[in-house]
Image: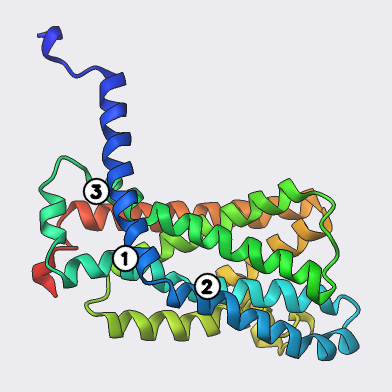
Amino acid sequence: MLLDAPRPGLDLLGSAHRIAALARHNLILRLRDPGQMISYVAMPMVLMLVLRPLYVRALDAGATQVATGLMVMFSVFAISLAGNAILSERTWRTWDRLRVSRAPAAELLVGKTLPLFGVMVTQQSILLVYGCLAIGLPVPPNPFLVFASILIWAFALLAIGAALATLVRSHGELSVITDVGALTLSSLGGALVPLSLMPAWAQAVAPASPGYWALNLMQSAVSGNVAGTLRPAAVLLVIGLLAGTFAARRLARGWGRGGLM
């Protein structure tokens, strides 16, 4: 009967309530153990100061290269935060309890990663401001463009991290993949050395790295080049949507059960 059908407004309210509860719980867990996130902010700050003279002498836009490059590199390292947020539930044998709740896989995924989204945005924003104050990075003429670029990149990273968490079987496996992957993807993307100075083979495979598109996105946004941000932003959005959909389907089909550990 029509009277028994759930009302869309109440359904949306219930969904928002469940996501908020999950996000609040995961935010508390993250605040109780902030060490990993602090290191991903402190380490690039130190490296920016140490490497700045070298980059400024070697490149015309050396300050931009060192600031945006290290920002992208250490944001890729933060993929492990998203992966561990999901993998910990499997390690604690609590993921099956979440799966039998009223929250579908998509809500579980959003609730687990939403606090980390704020953490990643904060990390990149702090590094950007630090780059302007201490490294000599030009102040972006369009701060909104830079902020939108940070949001897009954080979304892609979280989706990739969530997808990885549904594939690996242990924290050690996740750590190896994220650490090696972060160095490889960011280096191939030009985070450490400008693409024009890299070998021909590296230039050819660079577009396969999300770090390549992230660096192009950030450097275009910092310079205020709106047209230059459109293509990398679209690529990263597609990557994020594909990875997020994959993660949600894996979780919905039970491949994230604690019993698989």
Disc sitting over residue 85 in the figure: 1
> From mark 2 to mark 1, how far is it between C-alphas?
16 Å
**Label 2 secondary element:** helix
Residue at image position (31%, 65%) is 85
Residue at image position (62%, 57%) is 150
Mark 3 crowd level (few <14, some 14–19, many ≥20, 10 Å Cα): many
Q: Is tag 1's residue or tag 3's residue first in the polypeptide sequence?
A: 1
Q: Specify whether 55 is left or right of 35.
A: right
Q: Quadrant of the C terminus?
A: bottom left
Mark 1 crowd level (few <14, some 14–19, many ≥20, 10 Å Cα): many
Whether residue 184 is visible here, answered yes or no, is yes
Q: Specify whether 235 is left or right of 250.
A: right
Disc 2 and disc 3 in contact, CB within 8 angstroms: no
Residue at mark 3: 105
Q: Quadrant of residue 2?
A: top left
In percent of width and height, residue 237 lies at: 54, 52
- Disc 1 marks which amino acid? Ala
Whether residue 209 is visible here, answered yes or no, is no
**Label 3 secondary element:** helix
Which color scheme is applied? rainbow
> From mark 1 to mark 3, how far is it between C-alphas?
15 Å
Residue at image position (13%, 45%) is 101
**Label 1 secondary element:** helix
Q: Nearer the viewer, residue 97 or 4?
A: 97
In percent of width and height, residue 35 lies at: 44, 77
Tell me the mark number nearer the camera, choosing from 2 and 1.
1
Disc sitting over residue 76 in the figure: 2
